Amino acid sequence: MRFPDTFLIGGSVAANQYEGGCREGGRHLSTWDVFKFDPNVKGGQFTISYDDMLKASFDTNDDLYPKRRGTDFYHRYKEDIALFAKMGFKVFRMSISWPRIFPTGEEDIPNQDGLNFYRSIFEELHKYNIEPLVTISHFDMPLDLSIKYNGWENHKLIDLYIKYASCLFDNFHDLVKYWITFNEIDATIHIPFVGAGINPEKCENLKQSLWQGLHHQFVAGARAIKYAHETYPDLKIGCMSTKNLKYAKTCKPEDNIQTIMETMEDASYTDVQAFGEYPYVLINKWKKEGIHIKMNEDEMIDLKQNVVDFISFSYYASLVTSADKDPNALASANLLVGEKNPYLKQTEWGWQIDPVGLRYSLNQLYDRYKRPLFVAENGLGYNDIFENNTVHDTYRIEFIREHLKQVMIAINEDGVDCFGYTYWGCIDCVAGSTSQMKKRYGFIYVDQDDFGNGTKNRFPKDSFYWFKKVIASNGNDLD
Ligand code: BG6
């Protein structure tokens, strides 16, 4: 078995986790720049008090904040892209740092240094025939927009986002064909500050504010799509959500109805962007919970008329759910927590490894949306042992091999239209949830520890050479 000839295979990262250069070239801080490294962190650092956020915004001791330093792609992008090219990447998914283009989010004119920086990255990628896939907003809005407006809770963000997105389309439509409007848009509900710059302390009615913030993002995304489609018809714009695959704990009908209800709610984020309207599960949920979303007719028309060209998602792990949840048998899968699956192994961070679940997800999504799919994130975080300038990461090879096999089965045997796969954290970067360096995903080791010590030099791991072979054989050689 192999992938189709046009299959886009490569790697993925996000600006705040690898770029660094947090104050260079006119950039201001973003929401993700306020988290200090905490060696005792468990699960994830997703919340911060409003006062601590303000203090962090004035703190110039950048060494304390891992996401401010990333892994120095800002200065080393040519070296990194050359390494991706050596592996044969056909695609590189990256994000643009919003405050590098509009430092406070409210300037009338974009920051030319920021635009130049990304133009040279895209040109460098094209030099090696690597297709850029760009996420417009990956958890890092200008911090000022969170402080001043409480992020996406405020309707003003719609126009500010459209100004930003249309500026990117105008400047890069000749170099970037594939775009994603928001990374894991569902994060707004699960981790509001990281996902949408919404500080819960500042909300009168938290649930109401979160869904309102999400509505603003849906409208902003649809209007960005409208602008792109009308102005540059060749561009392809997708949405991106966390694929929270859930299995019923037993065949008991109550466990299965619970699973299907949760599955439909998890799907609702993509539903709105794919079908242009709110699904009944959400409308009913809001009714039951007394949530009233302000939305006007123009917004609903824009949502309906401007749906996405493709559906992308992150898939790391699956969960189990049931009608009577067992609070003691917990396992994680990225943003959510569920019950343990006795048939699956877990990573050191408690994420359940489930390659077959990726085939299941691809089929579920294709059946529901009948639109091209893209696996935007999938990967294994591991505390690698670095010896003699390399890492023997057979566990990572095994993880990717098993997941790629399932993608191939979904395409070749099940008939799913999936046009690409980008392995998450293709070069070691700062972990999104924990800000650790030791939770490494990469094919390329970066010599930097949790506290920022190290040369930041890059070293290929065993998986680097293995992935190169996989790409060269278009998936036929997975040994
Ligand atoms: C996804 C995010 O949720 O998971 C990434 O889009 C993140 O930003 C990735 O890095 C893996 O999570 P973590 O916490 O292991 O880095």
Image: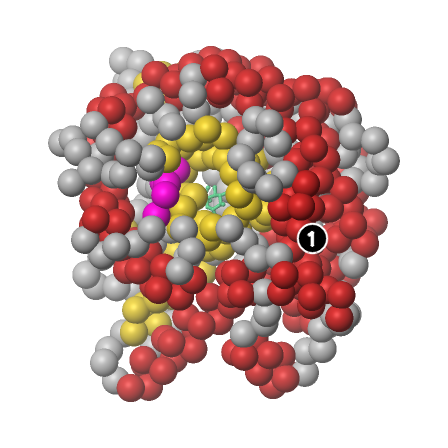
Is residue 60 visible to the viewer in this orientation of the structure?
A: no
Q: Is residue 420 magenta?
A: yes
Q: What residue appears at the point 50 percent right and 30 percent down from the top-left corner?
A: 132
Residue, disc 1? 223
Q: Is residue 290 magenta?
A: no
Please name whichever residue, 312 or 346, is drawn nearer the observer in this view of the structure. Answer: 312
| Segment colored magenta | 418-423
Please name whichever residue, 270 or 152, is drawn nearer the observer in this view of the structure. Answer: 270
Q: Position of residue 467 (x, y in %)?
A: 27, 28
Is 41 on the left-hand or right-hand side of 344?
A: right
> In the rendered image of this protein, does residue 276 appear above or below residue 461?
below
Q: Can you tell which quarter of the image residue 293 is in? A: bottom right
Is residue 420 visible to the viewer in this orientation of the structure?
A: yes
Is 320 on the left-hand or right-hand side of 226?
A: left
Is 114 on the left-hand or right-hand side of 323?
A: right
* Element type at mark 1: helix
Amino acid identity at mark 1: Arg
Q: Position of residue 323 (x, y in %)?
A: 36, 82
Total marks shown come to 1
Q: Position of residue 86 (x, y in %)?
A: 34, 16
Please name whichever residue, 402 or 203, is drawn nearer the observer in this view of the structure. Answer: 402
Image quadrant containing the N terminus: top left
Q: What residue appears at the point 37 percent right and 35 percent down from the top-left corner?
A: 8
Q: What residue appears at the point 36 percent right and 59 percent down from the top-left corner?
A: 366
Q: Position of residue 105 (x, y in %)?
A: 78, 40
Q: What residue appears at the point 43 percent right and 24 percent down from the top-left corner?
A: 130
Is 143 on the left-hand or right-hand side of 286?
A: right
Image quadrant containing the C terminus: top left
| Secondary structure, magenta segment, majority class | strand
CA neighbours of label 1 inside 10 A, class few (<14), some (14 to 19), many (20+): many
> In the rendered image of this protein, does residue 378 appear above or below residue 87?
below
